[in-house]
């Protein structure tokens, strides 16, 4: 599918079922194409569907490829065919959702000196203070790194949501593995909300079991969009071959099972995925 085709799909269309006219006859549904905001700053792309406006914000600078050697179980012929340039095109990304007058941020990137998240938010007119909710897919450093800067919480007013399973698993890890997580969660302690999969979260956000990549890895559905976190690190390989794992997947058999289940769900529901390591511009819809 050409990129513009799925962008059109991602932008979606809203069917307005017009009420009956004076003669009582139902009018034909009116298709209203939602405009993609333009021009857009580099590394930012916004789409809208059914009242949910979602922006991809690339946190990394320049082009990011995942080395082929990262992918387990991919034979070399397959890798050569699907990833001919010696690395799978990817990114480190976050997503901002604007819904019901609230700002919802999904993950925070690396928090590196050259990270682009805050610039991306600024270009969308959103200051760190204006983020109402922060939803975490999991606790790896490329997802929670942007929550802290110089020992301080970057998002001073955000209510933070994470899965209880993810929290518990990381808290039980040795100090050499969880130091960043402990420090970060402590900084947000009074605004931290731990949930079970299936709980109802603010603004109608639904958390889904995405376990495998990490012990409490979470996907979030909002409207017709599914924020998939690290369900896939190399879409060029894993969309067609969900049995392939990245070496980052902590429980590989479970990650494979989760990937297959979630991709089937996306197809059945005709959702658009927003992925933290998807190539620019961050969204993929399946037919
Ligand atoms: Zn990641």
Image (tube, rainbow, N blue to C red):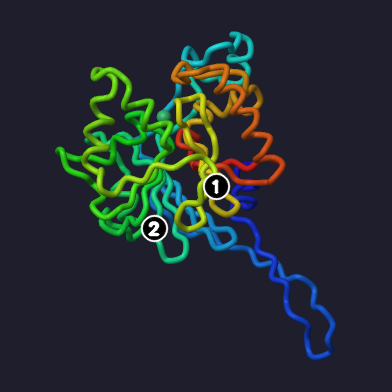
Label 2 sits on a secondary structure element that is: strand
Quadrant of the rendered image containing residue 173: top left
Q: Position of residue 1 (x, y in %)?
A: 67, 39
Return the disc, 2 or 1, that comes first in the chain's sequence. Answer: 2
**Does residue 27 lie above or below 228 as drawn?**
below
Q: Residue at x 66, y 25 (%)?
A: 240
The quarter of the picture showing ligand 1? top left
Q: Which residue is drawn at 50% across and 35% down?
A: 278
Ligand 1: does it lie within 8 Å of the C-beta at label 2?
no
- Name the side, left or right, on which 133 lies relative to 236: left
Q: For residue 103, which numbered disc appears in the image?
A: 2
Label 1 sits on a secondary structure element that is: strand
Residue 43 appears in view: no
Q: Position of residue 118 (x, y in %)?
A: 29, 48
Q: Residue at x 70, y 66 (%)?
A: 15
Q: Where is residue 70 in the image (x, y as percent from the top left)?
A: 47, 15
Q: Name the residue under label 1.
A: 221
């Amino acid at each position: 599918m050409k990129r513009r085709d799925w962008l059109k799909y991602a932008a979606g269309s809203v069917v307005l079922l017009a009420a009956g006219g004076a003669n009582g006859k139902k009018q034909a549904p009116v298709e209203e194409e939602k405009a993609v905001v333009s021009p857009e700053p580099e590394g930012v792309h916004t789409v809208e569907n059914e009242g949910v406006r979602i922006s991809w914000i690339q946190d990394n600078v320049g082009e990011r490829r995942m080395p082929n050697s990262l992918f387990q179980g991919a034979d070399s012929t397959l890798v050569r065919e699907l990833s001919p340039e010696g690395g799978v095109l990817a990114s480190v990304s976050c997503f901002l959702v604007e819904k019901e007058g609230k700002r919802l941020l999904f993950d925070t990137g690396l928090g590196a000196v050259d990270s682009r998240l805050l610039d991306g938010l600024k270009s969308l007119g959103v200051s760190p203070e204006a983020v109402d909710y922060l939803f975490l897919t999991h606790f790896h450093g490329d997802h929670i790194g942007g929550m802290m800067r110089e020992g301080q919480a970057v998002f001073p007013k955000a209510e933070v949501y994470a899965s209880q399973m993810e929290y518990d698993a990381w808290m039980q890890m040795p100090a050499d593995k969880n130091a960043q997580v402990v420090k970060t969660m402590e900084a947000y302690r009074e605004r931290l909300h731990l949930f079970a999969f299936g709980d109802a979260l603010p603004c109608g956000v639904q958390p889904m079991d995405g376990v495998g990549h990490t012990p409490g890895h979470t996907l979030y559905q909002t409207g017709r969009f599914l924020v998939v976190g690290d369900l896939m690190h190399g879409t060029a390989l894993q969309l067609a071959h969900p049995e392939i794992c990245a070496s980052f997947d902590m429980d590989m058999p479970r990650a494979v099972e989760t990937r297959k289940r979630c991709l089937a769900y996306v197809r059945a529901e005709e959702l658009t995925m927003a992925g933290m390591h998807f190539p620019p511009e961050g969204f993929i819809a399946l037919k």
